[in-house]
Every structure is written in C-alpha cells, then in structure tokens.
Image: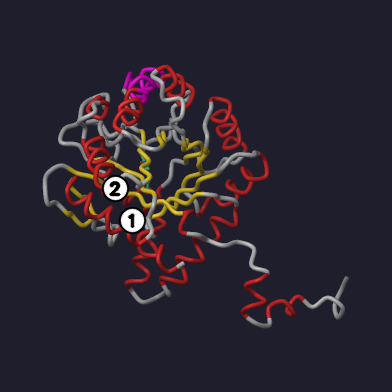
C-alpha cells in the first residue's frame, strides 16, 4: 500500500490515538536503582561525578531506601565500599561485610524492598581487579571460589537476587552449583553476561573506589568492537543456569540488546551505566538539554531495543514521573 492510500500521519493526529498505538511503555517496575554503601554512621558523601548519588553508611542507606520505596522504587542494586581490602576480595565473603550489613538492616526496616547484590571483587581487592592476581592477570578458576563464597554469603543474609559482574568464565555455573548445594535453589542469578571493557564506567570507579591499580580489564571484559562474541557469552551463561542475562553498558550497545532479544528467549537486563548518567547530568547542568525528556527517551530506547529490566541511576528521579 502506498501513498496516498497509506498515510502514516493519520495515527499521529491526536494524543489519545497516539497513546493507543504506542508500542513501548516504560513502567516503574522496569527500573532498578543502584546504591553505594560505605562504613560509618550518618555518612552521606556526595559522589562528585554522579550528581544526586551518594556513598551512604548503613543507617543513612536504610533512611534513603524508605524514601525511595515510598516514591515507587521497589528494587535496588547494592555496591560496597569496605573498611579494608585484601588481595582476593575475601573481605566481601563474610556475613558481617559492609554490603551484607546493609542488606540485613534494609530487610529489617523494609522487608518488601527487592535487593540485588552485585557479585564482584573489584571493590574489595587492594589492586582493584575483579579477582585473584596470578602472574599479573586475574586467575579465572581461583576467582570462581571467592565469587561463589560472596554469593553464598549474600544468600544467607537474605538478598533476593545475585548479579555476578566479574566476567570470569564459568562463574554462573559455579555459583549456581554452590547455591543449590547450600539449599538456595530458588536464588535467581542475573548475570552481567555481555559486559564490555568500557570507558563509560569512569564515574562508577570513583563512586565505588574500584579503579584497577595497574593495567585494565581487557583480559576479562569484552572488546567493544565485538557483537558475535556477546551472543557466545550469553549462550554460555544461559547454559550454566542464568535466569536473567545482562548487556552492559546500554546505550552504545543497543544493537547487542536487540540481537540478544532476537536470538534467545530469556529476560534481558541492561545497565544504563555511570558514564551515560553523568553525561546527561553534565549537559543538563549547563542547560543544554531537557533532562526529564532526555531521560525518558533514553530509558524508553533501552526498553524498545529489547530490555525487560533497566538498571539506572536516573531511577530515583524519574520513577514518579512515569
Ligand atoms: C563491578 C562493576 C562495575 C560496574 C558495575 N559493577 C565497574 C567495572 O567493571 O569497572 C559499573 C557500573 C557503572 O559504571 O555504572 N565489576
């Protein structure tokens, strides 16, 4: 059918009609808010490169979560800044570690809050890499042990989901087996399956104090040039038992989200990472963009590409505007 029989503008002529044919609808339930917990009491350190985000001590985190929950944020992703670090990240494997204490306190005050624990070692190692270093590189199989220990501890303190973000081979299967063996067969695993070695994580590394002290993460995170490889990573994680697969970052990788959606039949998460957030904030602060419209457009585009779940620092400000 061609013009003039077909006129695509017919369905755009008023708002009710436009809404009727709207294809992608962003819902509060799609969004997850990442948060950073730090030692001390009454601490609320602004994260300079991420306006509106803070490192919060456990007491302040609980207060913050209550406010967020009232606003409609039902799901959070927790990161930790520990008192001390060690070579392997073992500080994060104990039930009284910083994030675990936050989980216990939040669950006590707000049992309904859905808490996701990021599973990785980079915030907990002295060298800032995501695992145990042998001969100058992260040793895959030794790192699986610390990751699974961390996941088990989070299961014990009551998180609702674990999310390994380390990019070691075999971590989903290793973690699944460890969780099942301990009776946590119902603990969902949301795997950061296709996680790229990206410059968009810059502000996060300030926030979580997790920048690598030497080298970079290119031996474990993916090369931004690759797309076929992302599908192999995702397939591998599905085979190992991942319940949800994630693509990260989101905006420069919308094509990867779409290929994942077209190829697999599994829920997809996408992480709208710190650099993507901070660029919007910086431009908005200069008055160069309309922040609310831009944020809605960005999050909608991530969903339209195929994501079911979006992790975003914009969540706390946009959730009650949807
Ligand atoms: C930990 C982790 C990182 C992010 C989430 N989990 C940092 C990294 O890999 O360096 C980045 C999140 C963001 O930039 O918002 N491995």
Q: Residue 253 or 322: which is nearer the viewer?
A: 322
Seen at 73% across and 79% down, the residue is 9
Image x and y of residue 84, in percent:
16, 32
Image x and y of residue 118, in percent:
36, 38
Alpha-carbon span between mark 1 and mark 2 = 8 Å
> Range of the magenta residues?
133-148
Badge 1 vs badge 2, beta-carbon distance below 8 Å: yes
- Residue sitting farthest toward the bottom: 13
User: Which residue is tagged 2?
Assistant: 110
Q: Quadrant of ligand 1?
A: top left
Q: Residues within 10 Å of mark 1 (few under 14, many from 20)?
A: some
Dot 2 beta carbon under 8 Å from ligand 1? no
**What is the tally of numbered marks visible in this picture?**
2
Quarter-of-image position of residue 4:
bottom right
Asked which secondary structure carries label 1, the reply is helix
Seen at 41% across and 51% down, the residue is 32
Image x and y of residue 240, in percent:
54, 25
Among numbered discs 1 and 2, the one appearing first in the sequence: 1
Give residue 69's mark.
1
Up/down of 206 relative to 244, above or below = below
Quarter-of-image position of residue 239:
top right
């Amino acid at each position: 059918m061609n013009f003039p029989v077909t006129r695509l503008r017919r369905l755009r002529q008023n708002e009710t009609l436009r809404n009727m044919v709207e294809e992608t609808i962003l819902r509060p339930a799609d969004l997850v808010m990442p948060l950073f917990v730090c030692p001390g009491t009454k601490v609320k350190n602004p994260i300079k490169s991420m306006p509106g985000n803070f490192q919060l001590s456990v007491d302040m985190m609980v207060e913050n979560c209550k406010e967020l929950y009232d606003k409609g944020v039902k799901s959070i992703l927790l990161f930790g800044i520990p008192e001390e670090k060690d070579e392997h990240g073992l500080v994060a494997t104990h039930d009284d570690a910083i994030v675990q204490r936050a989980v216990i306190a939040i669950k006590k005050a707000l049992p309904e809050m859905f808490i996701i624990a990021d599973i990785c070692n980079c915030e907990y190692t002295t060298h800032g890499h995501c695992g145990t270093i042998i001969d100058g590189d992260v040793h895959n199989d030794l790192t699986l042990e610390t990751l699974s220990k961390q996941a088990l501890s989070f299961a014990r303190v009551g998180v609702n989901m674990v999310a390994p973000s380390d990019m070691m081979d075999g971590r989903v299967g290793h973690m699944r087996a460890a969780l099942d063996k301990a009776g946590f067969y119902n603990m969902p695993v949301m795997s950061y399956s296709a996680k790229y070695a990206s410059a968009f994580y810059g502000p996060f590394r300030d926030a979580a104090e997790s920048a690598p002290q030497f080298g970079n993460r290119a031996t474990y995170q993916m090369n931004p040039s690759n797309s076929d490889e992302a599908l192999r990573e995702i397939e591998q994680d599905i085979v190992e038992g991942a319940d949800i697969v994630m693509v990260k970052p989101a905006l420069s990788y919308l094509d990867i989200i779409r290929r994942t959606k077209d190829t697999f039949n599994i829920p997809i998460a996408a992480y709208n990472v710190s650099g993507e957030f901070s660029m919007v904030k910086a431009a908005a602060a200069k008055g160069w963009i309309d922040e609310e419209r831009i944020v809605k457009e960005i999050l909608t585009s991530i969903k339209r590409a195929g994501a079911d779940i979006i992790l975003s620092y914009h969540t706390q400000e946009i959730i009650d505007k949807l």
